[in-house]
Image (cartoon, grey):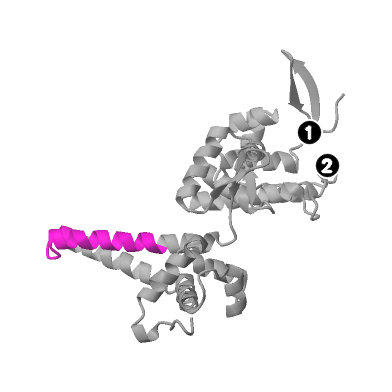
Amino acid sequence: MVNAHWADHRHNGRRTRMPGGRLTQQDRQHIASGLTQGLRYAEIARQLGRPTSTVSREVIRNGGTDSYRADRAQFATGRRARRRGTAPPAEPPTARDAHGRDPGEVRGFAEQFAAMMVRTGVPRMAARVLARLFTADSGTLTAAELVRDLQVSPASVSKAIGYLEELEVVRRERDPRRRRERYVIDDDVWLRAWTTSARTHAMWAEAAQRGVEILDPATPAGARLNHMSRFFARLSEDMAGGPAEAVLDDALTLLAALVHTRPSLTAEELAAALGWTPDRVHHALHATAGPERLNRAQQAALGRLHADQRPSPENP
């Protein structure tokens, strides 16, 4: 049976789709996804069951390999059709998700988001995994779900997750019900990435300064390292003046509160006592030692006080 777009054929026991109409929005999204993955025109055409020339003309006509966008290509095609006095075939209505969103449009945004990250230096597969996690309402997916959604191998997903874990933007979580791992992106991911980046810049500055002391700042190599040290030190200071400074101030306030409270105080009780939200307490705990080390943090804070500043046994 032949429809408006495809004819199904059997070849060596496998079903293939032969071209029989214009490219659809879904086809263009597939082309954009393939370009983002670095696939050649021939491979994309083979997956679509189209001639390679159809894909190459489509891409070249709509911005080329680096600038091709499915939504813009679809719009441009409709505009050209209207100028010629013809209209592109109407597509069947797309099923909406539970929130009334078009899944194809969401996937298209995820691929565009990934492409932007690739342009900033993020490896292609890591960018696609991160974009998929960000656009999942749950913020968590399994390896099998990522393999299915991105149509890639498990090894590709595993390598991308390893890279993102090193950046501390993704963490693993064990699903006890099904004995499998889930990959999670937390709401405070950018705060943690910010503080990690600030620490990294400080390490670069310190390492370069050690080189200055060894090589002598009056020499060309020493002067080069001195310039590098000052650059990264300034960068680290500037970043510390952003979100990290506010978190540090909260951490100090939290430690001061711990000095005058009993060791068994919970994070929820701290939030109530300080008039903070639970998330704010969580961030402050993360900046100090973490909830599991509250007692150690309290003892460390007590050790930094003078005798007359410490709470008396009669008024703990």
The 10 Å Cα crowd at callout 2, few under 14, some 14 to 19, many 20 or more, is few
Examine the image and state in which quarter residue 151 appears.
top right
Residue nearer the viewer, 267 or 98: 267
Is residue 271 shown left or right of residue 299? Answer: right
Looking at the picture, which amino acid does disc 1 mark?
A: Gly
Looking at the picture, which amino acid does disc 2 mark?
A: Pro
Residue lying farthest to the bottom in this orientation: 308
Q: Is residue 46 above or below residue 12?
A: below
Q: Main secondary structure of the magenta part?
A: helix
Mark 1 and mark 2 lie on one chain; the one further toward the N terminus is 1
Q: Is residue 20 magenta?
A: no
Disc 1 + disc 2, Cβ < 8 Å: yes
Q: Quadrant of the N terminus?
A: top right
Q: Which residues are magenta?
A: 198-222
Identified at 64% across, 45% down, the residue is 141
Q: Is residue 191 above or below residue 66?
A: below
Is residue 239 shown left or right of residue 90? Answer: left
Identified at 64% across, 39% down, the residue is 31
The 10 Å Cα crowd at callout 1, few under 14, some 14 to 19, many 20 or more, is few
Mark number, residue 21: 1
Which residue is tagged 2? 89
State the image coordinates of residue 224 (x, y, percent, origin top left). Answer: 21, 61
Residue 67 seen: no
Residue 6 seen: yes
Identified at 78% across, 29% down, the residue is 20
Q: Is residue 213 magenta?
A: yes
